[in-house]
Image (cartoon, grey):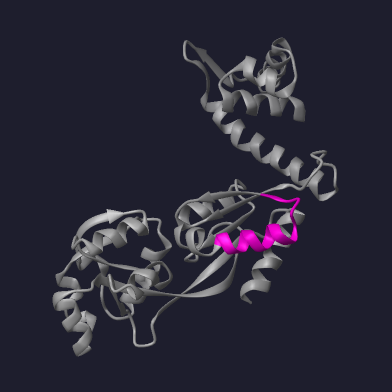
């Protein structure tokens, strides 16, 4: 097998069309078909299933696709590392970030990076922390940002920003009284309806860790809703749906405006690090190295 065959296979798998793949690769449709047929013959298996809806991967095809995608990505990195990309400009750096860093830190980092390296290009991908780590591990992203550490593969974490998790409530009624009287949140937070972040959220994972240190388990809470987006969480808290735990960075504007109250989770604050993550066992792009340096210049 060769790279041309693998590239044709991957494109067909993604476009579900031999004709569209031929156009994208500047080949004839019979050539694309010949590449796929050669792979199937060499591997002695059916890779693609033709049906009335187009083309779908067989079980063997799904397995090969995972390998082929990594091989082509590695070839791209080699070419770009040695200046053979032939694109006439910078590489496309794929940056994956969990919700908080994606919305509140990444825009400033990208602005500084592109100001210094205007020929580079960035593709920003947003997911929860678990999703970001999976993209790094499977090489679907070059650099990642997470709100927690999830040990997977060769992932290396570089803490660069100190964040704080706080309990947020409506700025009214009994909550104002709790704040004025300095009441310990342990005595009342478990009695309130609670808005939980999604399972893969770094905020949720870190909140569980911090509260566990105080002998509090999130499983004991009266969960009113599970919400992915922190903006939705804030609006829901303002409207009295329940209380929640969020990054102070996320809630800062509403707290200053008097719409929300922020209670510390610990006497010293519910501290957690925002991390830059990458795969130490995989070759990095020159653009990725430059991006890391920008992060260090801004925050370290």
- Residue 40 picture location, percent across and down: 65, 19
Q: Residue 289, can we see it?
A: yes
Where 63 sits versus 30, above or below? below
**In the rendered structure, which segment of residues is drawn in magenta?**
106-121
Does residue 108 show up magenta in the picture?
A: yes
- Residue 87 picture location, percent across and down: 79, 39
Residue visible at 79% across and 46% down? 80
What is the tally of numbered marks visible in this picture?
0
- Residue 86 picture location, percent across and down: 83, 38
Q: Nearer the viewer, residue 14 or 213?
A: 14
Res. 33 image quadrant: top right
Q: Among all residues in the image, which is located at the extreme front?
A: 257
- Residue 5 picture location, percent across and down: 73, 24
Q: Going by the image, does 140 lie left or right of 39?
A: left
Rendered-image quadrant of the C terminus:
bottom right
Q: Going by the image, does 167 lie left or right of 19?
A: left
Q: Going by the image, does 148 lie left or right of 231?
A: right
């Amino acid at each position: 097998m060769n790279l041309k065959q693998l590239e044709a296979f991957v494109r067909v798998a993604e476009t579900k069309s031999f004709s569209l793949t031929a156009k994208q690769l500047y080949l004839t449709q019979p050539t694309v078909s010949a590449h796929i047929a050669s792979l199937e013959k060499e591997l002695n298996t059916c890779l693609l299933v033709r049906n009335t809806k187009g083309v779908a991967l067989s079980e063997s095809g799904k397995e090969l696709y995972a390998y082929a995608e990594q091989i082509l990505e590695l070839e791209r990195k080699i070419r770009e590392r040695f200046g053979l990309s032939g694109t006439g400009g910078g590489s496309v750096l794929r940056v994956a970030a969990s919700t908080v860093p994606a919305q509140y830190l990444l825009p400033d980092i990208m602005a500084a990076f592109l100001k210094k390296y205007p020929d580079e290009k960035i593709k920003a991908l947003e997911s929860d922390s678990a999703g970001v780590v999976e993209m790094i591990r499977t090489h679907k992203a070059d650099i990642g940002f997470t709100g927690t550490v999830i040990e997977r593969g060769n992932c290396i974490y570089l803490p660069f920003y100190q964040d704080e998790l706080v309990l947020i409530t409506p700025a009214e009624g009994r909550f104002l009284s709790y704040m004025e009287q300095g009441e310990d949140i342990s005595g009342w937070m478990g009695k309130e309806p609670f808005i939980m972040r999604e399972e893969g959220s770094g905020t949720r994972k870190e909140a569980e860790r911090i509260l566990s240190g105080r002998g509090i388990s999130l499983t004991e809470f009266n969960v009113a809703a599970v919400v992915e987006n922190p903006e939705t969480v804030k609006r829901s808290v303002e409207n009295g749906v329940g209380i929640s735990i969020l990054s102070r960075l996320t809630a800062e504007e509403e707290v200053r405006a008097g719409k929300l109250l922020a209670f510390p989770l610990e006497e010293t604050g519910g501290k957690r690090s925002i991390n830059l993550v990458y795969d130490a066992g995989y070759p990095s792009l020159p653009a990725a190295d430059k991006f890391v340096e920008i992060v260090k210049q801004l925050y370290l």
